Amino acid sequence: MTTGSPQRGGDIRLSARVFGVVQGVGFRFWTMGKADELALRGVVKNLDDGSVSVVAEGPQEQVHQLLDWLRSENAPGRVERVEEAISAADGSFRDFRAR
């Protein structure tokens, strides 16, 4: 689900939940690497239900590249689905971390 319509050219925020076999397979580590490669800021963390939360901010093109990667066969484990929302970035992150 995509919500909001941030201004083109400004930073955006991706808030995503990734479902499938995504814990215990290096998912957070590889997501951090991809986010760093794309110069994004945010956080990735395991959730109690077995899913992974990803919040990333940066330029629209790079954020969409991360979303495409999360849905691709290149993401570790087995991603069954990704639920996402896009909004304007609020600048609350300085770098990208795993929690």
Image (spheres, grey):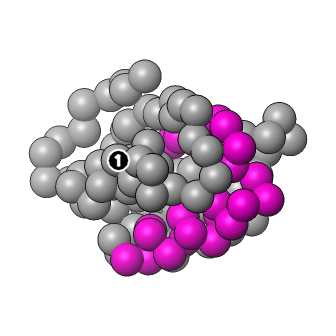
Q: Quadrant of residue 91?
A: bottom left
Residue 39 vs residue 81, the one in the foreground: 81
| Neighbour tally class for label 1: few under 14, some 14-19, many 20 plus, Cα within 10 Å | some
- 18 is higher (above) or lower (below) than 64: above
Q: Residue at x 52, y 34 (%)?
A: 82
Which quarter of the figure is the C terminus placed in?
bottom right
Q: Is residue 51 left or right of residue 55?
A: right
Is 22 one of the magenta-colored residues?
yes
Q: Quadrant of the N terminus?
A: top left
Judged left or right of residue 23, residue 12 is left
Q: Amino acid at mark 1?
A: Asp
Residue 43's x, y, as percent?
60, 61
Outermost residue on the left side: it is 8
Foreground residue among 33 and 40? 33
Q: Identify whether 81 is placed above or below 75.
A: above
Coordinates of residue 49 in the picture (x, y in percent): 83, 35
Q: Quadrant of residue 78?
A: top right
Residue at 44%, 68% (x, y): give it. Answer: 35
Q: Which residues are magenta?
A: 15-37
Q: Is residue 17 visible?
A: no
Residue beneath the point at 50% across and 75% down: 33
With 27 as the anchor, is 24 left or right in this view? Answer: right
Q: Position of residue 85 (x, y in %)?
A: 44, 32
> Circle 1 is placed at which residue position?
68
| Residue 22 locus on image (x, y percent) | 69, 49
* Residue 19 visible: yes
Q: Toward the viewer: 47 or 13?
A: 47
